[in-house]
Amino acid sequence: MYSILLSAGWPIWPLLIISIIGLAILIERAWYLRQIHLFPKDSLEKVFGAANAISEQKAVSEAEISAISQFSPVAPLFACILREKIAGSTADSALEELQASAQSTWLKLDRYLGALATIATVAPLLGLFGTVVGMIEIFGSQGAINGGAGSPQQLAHGISVALYNTAFGLLIAIPALAAWRGLRAMANQRQHECEEFTRQLFKKLYPNSVNSK
């Protein structure tokens, strides 16, 4: 492997760096977007249990709401509705606060996905850059300038730089694009699930408003 990196020349190092970054993003996002991480076991039951208590006009403390907000990265969205109901906010006011909280939640789900898409776009361009560098080394050799045959070793090195960088660029871009599409689908699925749970919670706490709409 090290010999391949040496044969590919210095243009391979930017490709190697972005490949490591892309792999780190893939692992982190795949772990973060797991359903069990965003919706831990029994967490939704506790949320709807608190909603039932509020609907029955039972006392629910701020400490309980704060504990609910710590369940998972999307739990603050559920805690927001509970707080608004306890505070006596109208359905329209609660919905406005919910939408503001949802924006920050969606940003958490989409975090780093843009960087992964950028890596998928930039990797072939870096590979092309390495190809150009390899061609420059070929035609810029002393033998080529003087019209001679040039050094076979330098010609071989230039060709290897060109081909290795093209291959590495595609080797990084294709998995990065596939990973971005897969993670994008996971993020959309988790957002849809979160929206559905939030809708059910809002319907339970504000039934008259939902029916009127």
Image (cartoon, helix red, strand yellow):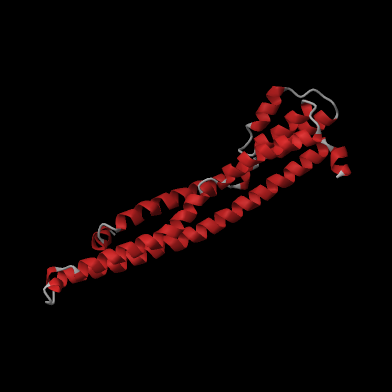
* The image quarter in which residue 11 lies: bottom left
Q: Is residue 119 shown to the viewer in this render? A: yes
User: Is 26 above or below relative to 171?
Assistant: above
Q: Is residue 17 left or right of residue 103?
A: left
Q: Is residue 42 visible?
A: no
Residue 205: quarter of image: top right
Point 49% across, 60% down: residue: 177
Spot occupied by residue 68 in the image (x, y as percentages of width and height): 68, 31
The x, y position of residue 208, in whole percent, is 88, 38
Image position of 165 (left or right of 175)? left
Say which quadrant the N terminus sits in: bottom left
Q: Residue at the location (32% across, 64% down)? A: 165
Location of residue 155 with respect to 34 vertically, above or below = below
- Residue visible at 88% across and 43% down? 211
Give above or below for 160 relative to 75.
below
Location of residue 51 in the rendering, given as x and y in whole percent from the top left corner? 78, 33
Nearest the viewer among 97 and 75 is 97
